[in-house]
Image (spheres, helix red, strand yellow):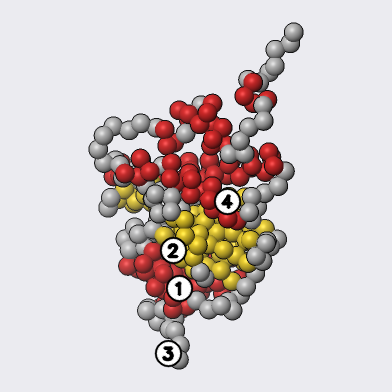
Amino acid sequence: MVEPRLPAAYLMPGSTSFSEFLGAQAPELLPSRRALPPGHAGDLAPHATTIVAATFDGGVVMAGDRRATMGNIIAQRDIEKVFPADEFSVVGIAGTAGLAVEMVRLFQTELEHYEKIEGTTLSMDGKSNRLAALIRANLGLAMQGLSVVPLFAGFDHNAGLGRIFSYDVTGGRYEETAFHSVGSGSLFARGSLKKLYRDDLSSRECVTAVIQALYDAADDDSATGGPDLTRRIFPVVHVITADGGTRMPEQEVAAIADDVIAGRMQRPDGPAAALT
């Protein structure tokens, strides 16, 4: 008798959740099962900030600055914080960078696993709920200072629009209207978007608005990196529409960032909102 090449668990019908499958077969590989020594570990790893997202007619934009910090030290100047989750959604990370990237990879696999098992993709609500479950499983590490707070966005074909979801460290899921931001510079980014956002923004105007917001966040938050003109490092920007998600070419982002900076040379406090 020929022995199967794969263990029996791989040849049996199972859960549509990859994390549940992994938890049953190799639980030690799950980030949430990792044991840490007692105490606060939040200052031992780089942290990532700030992520912004905004909807426009026909889609949604998500952008992240490129700075990671450890305390008052800049740990990395060109870290990437926005990743495609699947063809029609993206996830941006704030919090402990290493664990956040690990969670994004697990989330990407979770969505791919579901599609292979079911032969179709999860709905936007299903995707956002799966990400909430992964965050909830990380609560033990979050209580030790290693929190991960992502921002999730994508195009919902059933609703015909772009949608944004935010989370807290316990896995609480909240759908946002129009725009949102997470990370240490989020208060300043949200204030900027509150001034600049309109319902009738085009895709390019929406990208300009989120870059303006990141500029304002970097202006007031030392953990958020602004456009680095010397090294030519600019925010990572993803645009998601009914046709799918794409990462905006760096040359296009650089051109918009250069226009934003040129505008700030004339008006350092940024564009003004109408008073009426």
- The residue that mark 4 highlights is 127
Which residue is farthest right?
1
Closer to the camera: disc 3 or disc 4?
4
Which of the two residues, 214 or 157, is positioned nearer the viewer here?
Answer: 157
| Numbered disc 1: secondary structure | helix
Q: Residue at coordinates 68% horizontally, 38% vertically from top-left?
A: 117
User: In which quarter of the view is residue 88 placed?
Assistant: bottom right
Mark 2 neighbour class, 10 Å CA radius: few under 14, some 14 to 19, many 20 or more: many
The disc label shown at residue 181, or none: 2
| Above or below: residue 101 compared with residue 51 | above
Q: Residue at coordinates 39% horizontally, 73% vertically from top-left?
A: 191
| Above or below: residue 18 compared with residue 200 | above
- The residue that mark 1 highlights is 193
- The amino acid type, in three-letter code, at marker 3 is Leu
- The amino acid type, in three-letter code, at marker 4 is Lys
Which of the two residues, 5 or 94, is positioned nearer the viewer here?
Answer: 5
**Which callout, 4 or 2, points at the residue further toward the start of the chain?**
4
Quote the CA–CA distance across marks 3 and 4.
Answer: 39 Å
- The residue that mark 3 highlights is 275
Quote the CA–CA distance across marks 4 and 2.
Answer: 19 Å
Q: Is residue 236 visible?
A: no
**Which callout, 1 or 4, points at the residue further toward the start of the chain?**
4
- The amino acid type, in three-letter code, at marker 2 is Ser
